[in-house]
Image (tube, rainbow, N blue to C red):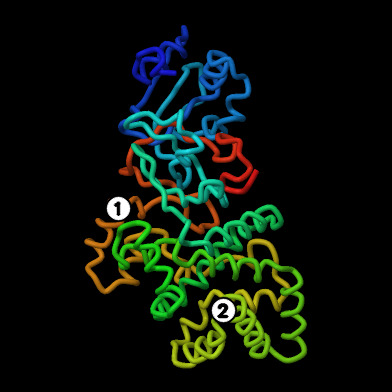
Amino acid sequence: MAAGFGLSAQDLLRGILGSPHGVKVTNTPATGLELFLSPSAQVVLARFSGLPRLPVLLPNLAAPHSRLVDDEVRRAAWYGPCGAWVGACPPCTARAWRPGQGVLVYPGAAGHVCRRHRRWLLAHTERPASIPLQTLPEVLAAHRRHAALVRAHPRAEQVVSLAAAVVWSWQVQGWNFERVWQDRARRLTAATGCTSAAVVPHALLTYPETIVIARLLGDPRWQQRLRAATTTTGTAAAATMLLKEIGRRVDRPWLADWLAACTRIGSREAARTDPLQRWLLKSADGANGDALWSVHQSAARPTGYSNRARFLTDRRSRFVVEEAKAASLTGGWEPWAAPRAVPDDAMPVTVLADTARLCRLGDVGGVQ
């Protein structure tokens, strides 16, 4: 709307929100990441735009913010968004992209892949950024299964977060040198133009294995089977059965023996916080809800790219992070159980929307 009137976003808002009780506009699109409105300002903007359902179409526009006082003054402010964001698929939203002004969306649980155009969406504010997946068919297949899990399981995000912690525990034990990940890393470096060190910490590298494990752990039939095995043959036998099934599903038949050896030579603390072992014990005890899917803080997959890079590369992490940042690999969707705020010093962005609501395409993100 601001571009159509030839005004800055702040001046347009002041004009729209004009009130005898006063208008207060804080920050700018250049200093904040997302526009937040007070309740009275939301009503006025929806009426002005001719879209009474504007808060429904752009649900985050109606999100409350603790720093906006709800009084007679109509208030608007640009602050950091409430979760990870990505640039919308360019072919899906080409008409909305403007020079230096991107179309940015919240990917939600599984909206980080456009299956129609085969892209993994990345976070960049000024230009389209994505990873082509034509040479990574296993990632597209995993996303289809991920979308089905989101539709079927009420705690899908927590399940995926736990599965990501399980895979992370394998990465830090040196599993990143095995053939499947090495081959995927080579294809990913070719698709991004980055070095292997820069792509290894990215969520895409281990995404197929993460979704395989999430579907297995989230399957009620397997949970019941493991509880029965624990009761009849003991926890160790149930753990072996689970590891063999995981190895079969991820096409690593050696996995059960390898993990058993790592457990024998590892510390007691590592065994106590191991996400898979903890989940198995809690499942055997009949835990459910948040208790079943919680991850010990020390075992969780690090939320920051730089923290993961320090664990996974022999190069100086500062140079790896700089290379990854240039390729937009340090932000975007991550397998987290809950939204996390973008740092205050992150890049500016226009108002964000929900991926599926914005594009209205069933195969953008795969989730409605």
**SS at circle 1:** helix
**SS at circle 2:** loop
Q: Measured along the vertical axis of the image, is residue 157 above or below residue 229? A: above
Q: Residues within 10 Å of mark 2 (few under 14, many from 20)?
A: few
Q: Which residue is mark 2?
A: 251
Quarter of the view holding residue 232? bottom right
Going by the numbered disc 1, the residue's amino acid type is: Lys
Quarter of the view holding residue 301? bottom left
Residue 325's mark? 1
Quarter of the view holding residue 228? bottom right
256 or 250, nearer to the observer: 250
Instruction: Identify the residue at image location x=52%, y=73%.
Output: 166
Residue furthest out toward the front: 134
Quarter of the figure with the N terminus: top left
* Residue 340 point in image, percent of width and height: 46, 50
* Residue 27 point in image, percent of width and height: 34, 28
